[in-house]
């Protein structure tokens, strides 16, 4: 087992990983930028090393600095968290070449799944249903238009290297195609340094349902059931829950089996998420995320399995110590992402000092956060400041607890998305579990 692990991240996920390390009696090395001097992860880790200026490219994305920090601290392994370098195959490779264990999948898996066109091709070959679409990158407008007409409008043009809800254009008719196609290519190049795009059938109001998988280095793959992440703004998740209220047991079985089959086909190691869209009773593979996800706690709450600890054990070469038939799901969990943004002012970021903070507790409430009273939210990073997760024996009880917990919370004077969450979870359709990816747009909270 590892003795000391470097956490190559910040914010709530760095705190989450350090917690898992400490429970496994492993020392944690935090890295931080000049903008994060007072962040909680630097204080709860056993060692903290400043690696560079506030801007991510000079610090959390600076591979040389991170490797140096691992060397001077005597770490045996590096956990990348999510975002930053978590899905950078080059980083995973360098980490291993420098003699550290990378707590994540192999560079090959990262590369394969990071190319969303290849990922779909491989999954289709493995017998996993995929969203109808081009099987290769399309660079020629004429060819693209021909394909779009074949599958029928509306279509969605997506960046092959896309992520974070970026690089997607919906096209509803032929006239619009050329313009949107050009924009998609330019956006893809700008955001991901790769202008390759592909085209998919655009599904109207699907549900986003994903399966958590775990694979070890002995070829064992298990699933921890599904999560639903249909409540999105600009293709980015805001609320997630487990299990999905949309699935009956038969569909759940088919979906989770398909996910395991897909993960086995690529000999997947570590924790991963197979993302699907679900529409008219059918599910279609969309992409795979080869890292721990923001919304992993809802799965932990219903299965009582610590996914981050599992990642560490798997990377240390241990065999999965849980059998599929031993995994049960109990009750229902819902997570809201609390962002330091003003929902009244087009989600403008709201950094600054937290003067007053009271976070809720009580039965069934879990908070994953790096904030504390007096903490100054820096303006340089994404605006997620806390995740509030409610567990209940039923979905109804989870919603009730979430409401109660939101009412107990004080975060002043920072503007947060809490007020928006309150509106959503008290919406009749939400309560009835009638979710889809255009839910917020229909509530008038789209852009
Ligand atoms: N073919 C599609 N039809 C309808 N919505 C889609 C389609 N592809 C993507 N989306 C929307 O975009 C979201 C993110 O898609 P995804 O491919 O996972 O991108 P990212 O890599 O940014 O996470 C989905 O959850 C869904 O809301
Ligand atoms: Mg996705």
Image: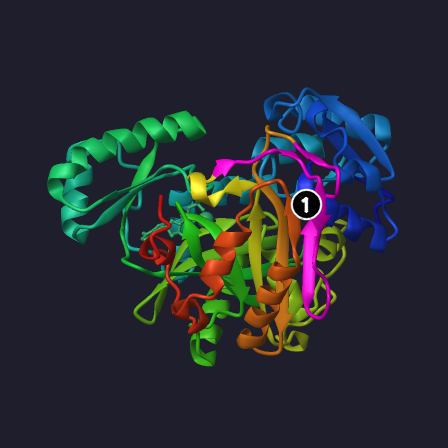
- Residue in the foreground of this view, choosing between 223 and 318: 223
Question: As rendered, which of 425 and 102 lies closer to the eye?
Answer: 425
Disc 1 is placed on an element classified as helix
Does residue 361 lie above or below 134 as drawn? Answer: below
Q: Does 369 appear in magenta?
A: yes
Based on the picture, tell me whether residue 185 belongs to the magenta stretch. no
Query: Residue at point 63% right, 76% down?
Result: 330
Q: Of 241 and 51, which appears nearest the observer?
A: 241
Q: Which x, y percent locates residue 416? A: 56, 45
Neighbours of disc 1 within 10 Å: few (<14), some (14-19), many (20+) = many
The residue that label 1 is drawn on is 12
What segment carries the magenta color?
348-377
Please say whether residue 136 is visible from this viewpoint. Answer: yes
Q: Residue at x 44, y 39 (%)?
A: 345
The image quarter in which residue 80 lies: top right
Instruction: Describe residue 335's horizontal placement relative to residue 197 as left or right.
Output: right
Task: Please name the colour scheme applied to the rendered image.
Answer: rainbow
Percent position (x, y) of residue 106?
A: 61, 43
Q: What residue is rendered at 68% in x and 69% in y?
A: 364
Q: Is residue 293 above or below residue 300?
A: above
Residue 370 placed where, x, y %?
71, 44
Give left or right: position of 84 versus 101: left
State which quadrant residue 66 falls in: top right
Left or right of 129 in this view: 389? right
In this rendering, does residue 299 appear at all?
A: no
Which quarter of the rendering shows the C terminus? top left
């Amino acid at each position: 087992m590892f003795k000391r692990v470097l956490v190559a991240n910040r914010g709530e996920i760095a705190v989450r990983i350090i917690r898992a390390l400490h429970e496994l009696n492993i020392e944690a090395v935090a890295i931080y930028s000049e903008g994060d001097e007072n962040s909680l992860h630097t204080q709860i880790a056993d060692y903290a090393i400043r690696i560079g200026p506030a801007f991510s490219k000079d610090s959390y994305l600076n591979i040389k600095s991170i490797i140096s920090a691992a060397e001077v601290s005597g770490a045996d392994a590096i956990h990348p968290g999510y975002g930053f370098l978590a899905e950078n195959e080059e980083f995973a490779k360098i980490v291993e070449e420098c003699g550290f264990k990378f707590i994540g999948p192999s560079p090959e898996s990262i590369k394969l799944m990071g190319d969303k066109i290849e990922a779909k091709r491989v999954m289709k070959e493995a017998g996993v249903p995929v969203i109808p679409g081009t099987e290769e990158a399309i660079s020629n407008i004429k060819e693209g238009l021909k394909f779009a007409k074949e599958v029928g409008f509306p279509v969605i043009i997506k960046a092959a290297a896309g992520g974070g809800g970026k690089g997607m254009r919906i096209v509803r008719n032929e006239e619009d195609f050329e313009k949107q196609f050009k924009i998609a290519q330019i956006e893809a190049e700008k955001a991901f340094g790769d202008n390759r795009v592909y085209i998919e059938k655009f599904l109207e109001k699907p549900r986003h349902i994903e399966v958590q998988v775990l694979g070890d280095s002995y070829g064992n793959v298990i699933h921890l059931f599904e999560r639903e992440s249909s409540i999105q703004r600009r293709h980015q998740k805001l609320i997630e829950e487990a299990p999905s209220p949309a699935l009956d047991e038969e569909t759940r079985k088919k979906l989770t089996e398909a996910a395991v089959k897909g993960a086995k086909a690529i000999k997947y190691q570590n924790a991963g998420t197979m993302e699907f869209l679900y529409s008219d009773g059918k599910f279609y593979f969309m992409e795979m995320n080869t890292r721990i996800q923001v919304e992993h706690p809802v799965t932990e709450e219903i299965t009582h399995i610590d996914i981050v600890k599992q990642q560490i054990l798997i990377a240390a070469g241990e065999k999965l110590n849980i059998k599929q038939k031993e995994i049960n799901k109990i009750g229902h969990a819902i997570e809201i992402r609390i962002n330091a943004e003003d929902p009244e002012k087009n989600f403008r970021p709201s950094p600054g000092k937290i003067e007053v903070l009271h976070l809720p507790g009580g039965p069934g409430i879990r908070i994953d956060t790096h904030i504390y009273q007096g903490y100054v939210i820096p303006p340089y990073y994404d605006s997620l400041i806390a995740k509030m997760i409610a567990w209940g024996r039923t979905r109804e009880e989870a919603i009730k607890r979430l409401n109660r917990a939101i009412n107990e919370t004080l975060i002043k004077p920072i503007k947060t998305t809490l007020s928006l969450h309150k509106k959503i979870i008290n919406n009749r359709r939400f309560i009835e579990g009638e979710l889809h990816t255009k839910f917020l747009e229909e509530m008038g909270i789209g852009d």
